[in-house]
Image (tube, grey):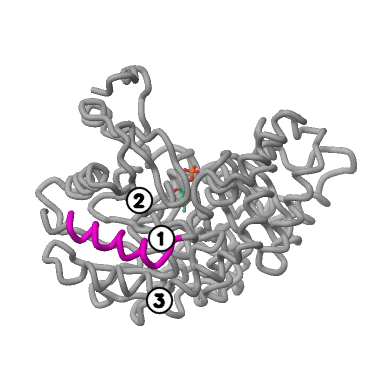
Amino acid sequence: MSQTTPLENHWMPFTPNRDFKARPRLTVKAAGMYYWSEAGTQLLDASAGLFCCAAGHCRPEITAAIQQQAQTLDYVPHFQSAHPLSFTLAEKLAKLLPTGLDRIFFTNSGSESIDTAIKIAIAYFQAKGQGARQRFISRERAYHGVNIGGTALGGMTNNRRIFGGVGLPQVAHLRHTWLAENKFTLGQPEQGKELAEDLQRFITLYGAENIAACFVEPIAGSTGVLVPPKGYLERLREICTQYGILLIFDEVITGFGRTGKAFAADSFGVTPDIITMAKALTNGAVPMGAVAVKRDIYDTIVNHAPEGVTEFFHGYTYSGHPLACAAAHATLDIYQQEKLFERASELSAYFLETVFNSLHDLPIITDIRGYGLLAGFDLAPTAQAGMRGAMLQKELFWSGMHLKTTGDAGIISPALIIEKTQIDQLCQLLRDVLKRF
Ligand SMILES: Cc1ncc(COP(=O)(O)O)c(C=O)c1O
């Protein structure tokens, strides 16, 4: 038991509560690439928190921007009123996004971004007179957050096992892109482009006139980093364009330099119609998400409504919160001033090779994948799937590292400021701990 912290009342998310509370792993401080535990142990952060803190922890520029904003304008609603920062932030984001995606709706999380994107897609087709387009396409092993729409889209078994039937029933799932023949491939695998034809099959089965959008994570992150096979995203784009289906990239993990460019859409050279984002938008300092849409989508919805009438009946009390906007402004400035996306691109080969060389010969490792500064590895499961991943996360904490695991996969996604020596330390420590398994 923690000596000072009362643990009973907080129902922790995505956590075995009884196990955690029996031997809690509390973190009390962070700076740069590190966390510190309650006991004072320094932990190398191998996952940028939860893919959030791309510029490293507790950046003074972001802290100062939040402090300043909190004492100037703490809150103003965005329903029929506003403050300038959300507009300037939208303008800044539009410059970073692929050409044409320049209309931005603010949310407070990735999950809210996903549900917002679902509603935008429905509203868009209603406005176009194609209201029958109500069905969505997603993918096995997808993670699109935990709200009702995102749960229906999701393809990770435990997340949907008891909830899959609620919300939007009209979701068909493409096959995932993990293939045994691509094992231990770094970068985009050669095999699997043809899996995109599943979309064509759903169109044949359900009719394109009934399908609104196809959601994919360009790299499926939370399931353990599934990099898209060469040609796969391009083919999805082709099919969506051919049939007037919106292609939606969920870039909640891949956005903001993780793949070596601002967005994975840039890295893979495929432009979707909508991008959802969150996490590294504010470096994790204040919750914020956003949905970027092509101008035609915004214009179609907005121009459909009579003058003076609200065009899109959707929004959150905290959409465009001043503190989040201030944090996002400061974060995007850091990314630009420190050229962190370029840095991620330059470091990528060293990072991926070091991960691979450090882990691939361990018998417990059954696959390694990666792209940019994002790598995933699979552990041979025990009789109880997911136990090994959970054990690894715990063991690493006690050994001086924070790593995100999901099921029996580990996900390495360090802040973009990581040094090569820290990549070496990270991989060595991981290897040392895994050798004990
Ligand atoms: C691809 C993707 N979409 C959506 C989400 C949900 O984001 P949040 O936890 O901020 O609601 C996540 C979270 O990890 C994610 O990885």
Distance CA(mark 2)–CA(mark 1): 24 Å
Whether tag 3 and tag 1 are in contact, CB under 8 A, the answer is no
Q: Nearest the camera: 25 or 275?
A: 25
Residue occupying the point 47% across, 50% down? 32
- For disc 1, the marked residue is 220
The N terminus, quarter of image: top left
Distance CA(mark 3)–CA(mark 1): 20 Å
Residue occupying the point 55% across, 41% down? 285
Between disc 2 and disc 3, the foreground one is 2
* Residue 293, x across and y down, in percent: 68, 57
Given the image, on which type of amino acid does mark 1 rest? Ala
**Can residue 290 be found in the magenta stretch?**
no
Given the image, on which type of amino acid does mark 3 rest? Ala
- Assign a secondary structure to mark 3: helix
- For disc 3, the marked residue is 349
Given the image, on which type of amino acid does mark 2 rest? Leu
- For disc 2, the marked residue is 44
Which stretch is magenta? Answer: 418-433
